Image: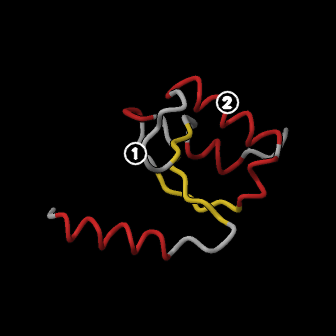
Amino acid sequence: MGSKEKSSVKKRNCRDVPKGCLAIKVGQGGEEELQRFVVPVIYFNHPLFLQLLKEAEEEYGFDQKGTITIPCHVEEFRNRDGK
């Protein structure tokens, strides 16, 4: 993929994230394919989401490039509800 194509993909991805939201990747790396989620930024203050961010920091450090990756099984991420 050329740099012009990469630029076009980045612009398209930015446009499909509504204002007040952030795109993240979720998955357990080699065990499952990463999936992209668009999350309202207000969720980042929720205790469950803060725990996921802490796990991401422990797994990847603060030096992630690009989209934040959350090391969590996709189904677990979808079903987390505080129980």
Label 2 secondary element: helix
- Kind of residue at disc 1: Glu
Question: Which image quadrant: the N terminus?
Answer: bottom left
* Residue density around tag 1, few if under 14, some if 14–19, many if 20 or more, within 10 Å: few
The label shown at residue 11 is none
Query: Looking at this view, is 63 or 72 the one in front?
Result: 63
Residue 25, x across and y down, in percent? 50, 49
Q: CA distance from mark 2 to mark 1?
A: 21 Å
The amino acid marked with disc number 2 is: Lys
Determine which residue is flagged by label 2.
54
Read off the residue under disc 1.
33
Which residue occupies the foreground of this view, 12 or 28? 12
Sooner in the amino-acid sequence: mark 2 or mark 1: 1
- Numbered disc in front, either 2 or 1: 2
Where in the figure is residue 47, as x and y percent of width and height? 82, 39
Residue pictured at 58% horizontal, 23% vertical: 58
